Amino acid sequence: MQYVLYFLIAIGATTAGSLTGMGGGVIIKPLMDVLHQFDVETIGVLSSITVFSMSAVSIGKQMLAKAQIPFRIAIPLSVGSVAGGYLGQWLLRQIVSGLGAQGMVTVVQNGLLAVLILVVYFYMRHKADIRGLQLSGVLVSLGAGCFLGVCSSFLGIGGGPINVALIIYLYSVSTKTATICSLMTILFAQISKLLTVSMTTGFGVYDLSVAPVMVVGAIAGGFLGASLSKRCSEEGVERAFNAIQLLVLAITVFNIVRNLIGG
């Protein structure tokens, strides 16, 4: 039963993540916090493995379909996210070590995620009234990618809504274009995090028993999400994006309250 549950979480989250560019980790992480069956760092690793599988499949499918990928933005963002992924994983280890209590680490992660989601939700609902910056240049993209990589790795969310909203704001691109850039950034951030884990603690210290079924779910979700993205309109993708944000916000608030009361 446990394996079926985590398969359903993975395929549901990554289908939505591939469609909207969120990556899926923004759903997987708080849901696994609710289930409370793994510690914070193990959840982060499981989320990274799952999201990496989904993003690799989704990007591959987009490229085979000859989707327009703005490499001048996507490549520097991806490179920056690698550095950010290393930094985010280091910050997570420091906070876990400093706070000690797993419950308080969960509160910190979910609290930061809730704030970021509120900001992004407000922006996406009012972006027509907020003028984009139309920035360009490698340094800007490297800096943005680094910031997104830190958020992705530290929060264990794979990138989430932050990627899409920031890319739209900085470069004034469409939601679908931002989605593709976001997925590339997510892919490289997860590579960075998984390499960091392999070179520091290694994977043997984590309980990865559900990882195989989550990877299968993620691969299926990557295919499903990419197919839905081709069929959905720009407005349809935005509606799905905003609906998922509200769902995740509700889950993060529940996690915060439960851990504060329990603590």
Image: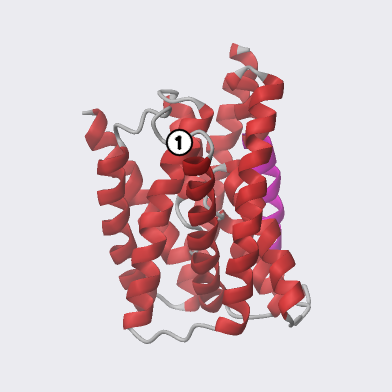
Q: Is residue 56 magenta?
A: no
Residue displayed at 62% across by 79% down = 73
Left or right: 183 with respect to 258? left
Q: Is residue 140 above or below residue 219?
A: below
Q: Where in the figure is residue 143, as x and y percent of width and height?
A: 74, 65
Q: How many marks?
A: 1
Residue type marked 1? Gly
Quarter placement of the C terminus: top right
Closer-to-camera residue (254/218): 218
Residue displayed at 42% across by 55% down = 52
Q: Where in the figure is residue 1, as x and y percent of width and height?
A: 21, 28
Query: Does residue 98 appear in this view?
Result: yes
Q: Is residue 247 above or below residue 240?
A: above
Query: What secondary structure is found at the residue carrying circle 1?
Result: loop
The residue singled out by tag 1 in the image is 202
Q: Which residues are magenta?
A: 110-124
Residue displayed at 51% across by 58% down = 22
